[in-house]
Amino acid sequence: MTELRGYPRARRLAAALAGCLALAGCAPKSWVVLLPNEDGSTGRIIVTGPGGEAEVARAGQAATLDTSVPKTFDASEQQIQETFGGALAAQPALPTVFRLYFELGGTQLTPESVALLPSVLNEVAGRPGADISIVGHTDTAGRAADNEALGLERATFVRDRIVEAGLRLDRISTESHGEGNPLVPTADDVSEPRNRRVEIVVR
Amino acid sequence: MVDWLRRLLCIAAVLTMSTSAYAESEPIGYVKTHAGAAFVVTGGETLEAFPGLSLHESDHIRTGEDGQLGLTLLDNTVMSVGPNADLVLEEYLFRPGEGDLGLGVRLLRGTLQFISGVIAKLRPEAVKVRTTTGTIGVRGTRFLVRAED
């Protein structure tokens, strides 16, 4: 009885082994595979072992991490899903950036940005455990020190709108880059609407 | 003279203490997703993961047989691990204003997805993903790693 039950199991194992050997890319225990970025581009990684290194620069290209010199191979979609299904499923939403623009010299949002504010709040509400970076910017009109303060006022104004919507304060960072980090570089003392802004990263 | 020296040492000690306390209190990122057995080990304490749980330098991310966890760091680096993972957040430096940038993680076991952020964009050579047997240098990209003995 035991022998009868044992037999198919051994055969299954043998078949699995044969299948594995038949695949050119029977994956090693430790390996790395490159994926395309969300925007469709693909970057590059350098894999280094004790005895040498290998470059991986194509989506789907993989390299061993348990050989002295990393060996490259092509990983199949199936191999990737079987090995990394859990890690892929746990991927959080990628951080999103919003820009809100202000009228000259104060914390009055432009009408377009007033209209955009609800989508910022929606994005925050839709992300469990969201954390937010808010950076205030100004144009170069006026004194740099005043603009430093104005940038912070703008960032704080946006933070207060988000806090009103119920996000915990300890996961919001607020800072000012004043006139020092313009979206559109200008000479000093230039009023430029595109630089009067707050940049919000929702993670 | 001795008095001066003593005062100087005193100031130095206070400064050192306040900087390390500051470093300890500053989160480097937050847990965003979790499933099954998923934990953050921080300063000898094991915390069950939840969205919004803060992460600090040298924390371990650990998952059980049915576990998964996803996190983001302050520079928009995104990482997620599958079952039976142990990932150490070894090194994190993100002060772009001062040019202080560094990100080093070590996957002791399990699977990891890594999506690079601002640090890799500003200084690619400052980003390293290590396993017990190899090192992955990141040039602004998304990849998967598995580490098993």
Image (tube, coloured by chain):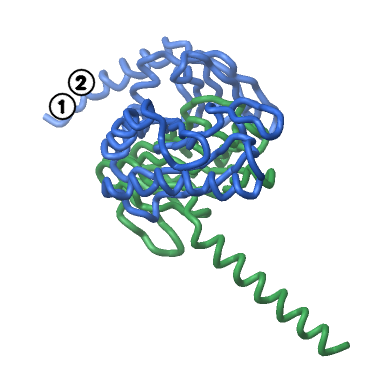
Chain colours: A blue, B green
Quadrant housing the C terminus of chain A: top left
In this view of the protein, which residue sits in the foreground, A123 or A135? Answer: A135
Asked whether disc 2 touches disc 1, contact meaning CB atoms under 8 Å apart, the reply is yes
Q: Is residue A85 left or right of residue A74?
A: left
What residue is disc 1 on?
A: A5
* Residue A80 picture quarter: top left
Q: Is residue A88 left or right of residue A33?
A: left
What residue is disc 2 on?
A: A8
Q: Single out the residue that lies furthest toward the left.
A: A1
Q: Residue at x 70, y 31 (%)?
A: A51
Residue A153 location (% of width, % of height): 48, 48
- The residue type indicated by label 2 comes to Pro
Up-down relation of residue B61 to residue B6 (above or below): above
- The residue type indicated by label 1 comes to Arg
The secondary element bearing badge 2 is classed as: helix
The secondary element bearing badge 1 is classed as: helix
Q: How many marks?
A: 2
Residue B134 can be seen in this image: no
Q: CA distance from mark 2 to mark 1?
A: 6 Å
Mark 1 — on which chain does it sit? A
Residue B60 location (% of width, % of height): 45, 52
Residue B124 location (% of width, % of height): 64, 32
Discs 2 and 1 carry the same chain letter: yes
In this view of the protein, which residue sits in the foreground, B86 or B2? Answer: B2
Q: Single out the residue that lies furthest toward the right.
A: B1
In this view of the protein, which residue sits in the foreground, A78 or B2? Answer: B2
Q: Residue at x 31, y 15 (%)?
A: A15
Mark 2 — on which chain does it sit? A
Q: Residue at x 71, y 81 (%)?
A: B10
